[in-house]
Structures are given as C-alpha cells and as structure tokens.
Amino acid sequence: MATRKQLDKQKKARALKKKKMTLAKEARAREETPEEKAERREQQAFDRKNPGGEMKGGLRQGGSTPPMHRPQGG
C-alpha cells in the first residue's frame, strides 16, 4: 500500500507531466502554418485508415515484417 507521501508525489508528477505536454502542444500549434496543419491532419487520417506502416507510395515505412505463416505439422 502506498503511503500518503508517495501518493502526493505521484499526483504532483502526473500534474507536471500533463502541464509539460500541454505547453508543448500549444507551442507546436503556434509555430504550425495552416497548410502544415492540414497536411498533418491528412497524414493522420491516412494512418488511421491504413495501419501497418504503409506510405502513400505503397512502400513500407519500417517497423515489423508481416507475420509469417507457421504450418502446424502433424
């Protein structure tokens, strides 16, 4: 069982992490032009429709190889 001191420390760490993420997101939003934003959204939509690391050109971007079939010998 965690002590009250440990729980408070965890709570503060989570709040700090959330604050840092929010600040980074705001900074990124400020420096992004509308064209870049539209391009990023388009890429995100494509990634959601095509999981697995493919690029629009059809080549794999990297990551893991396709799963191999293992015949079940008998």
Image: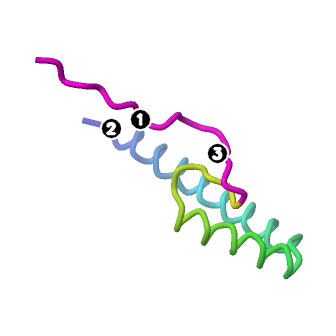
The relative height of residue 74 versus residue 14 in the rendered view (above or below) is above
Q: Is residue 5 left or right of residue 37?
A: left
Query: Which residue is the site of mark 2?
Result: 3
Q: Is residue 67 left or right of residue 60?
A: left
Instruction: Return the mark for residue 17.
Output: none
Secondary structure, magenta segment, majority class: loop
- Whole-angstrom CA distance, mark 3 to mark 2, is 48 Å
- Whole-angstrom CA distance, mark 3 to mark 1, is 14 Å
Please report the bounds of the magenta region as a residue range.
57-74
**Residue in view at x 49 percent, y 43 percent:** 9
Q: Quadrant of residue 55?
A: bottom right
Tell me the SS state at disc 3. Answer: loop
Q: Are marks 3 and 2 in contact (CB under 8 Å)?
A: no
**Looking at the image, is mark 2 or mark 1 earlier in the sequence?**
2
- Whole-angstrom CA distance, mark 2 to mark 1, is 45 Å
Q: Position of residue 23 (x, y in %)?
A: 73, 64
Which amino acid is tagged 2? Thr
Mark 3 residue crowding within 10 angstroms, few (<14) / some (14–19) / many (20+) = few
In depth, the one of 45 and 21 nearer the eye is: 45
Query: Which residue is the site of mark 3?
Result: 60
Q: Position of residue 8 (x, y in %)?
A: 44, 48
In depth, the one of 56 and 17 nearer the eye is: 56
**Looking at the image, is mark 3 or mark 2 earlier in the sequence?**
2
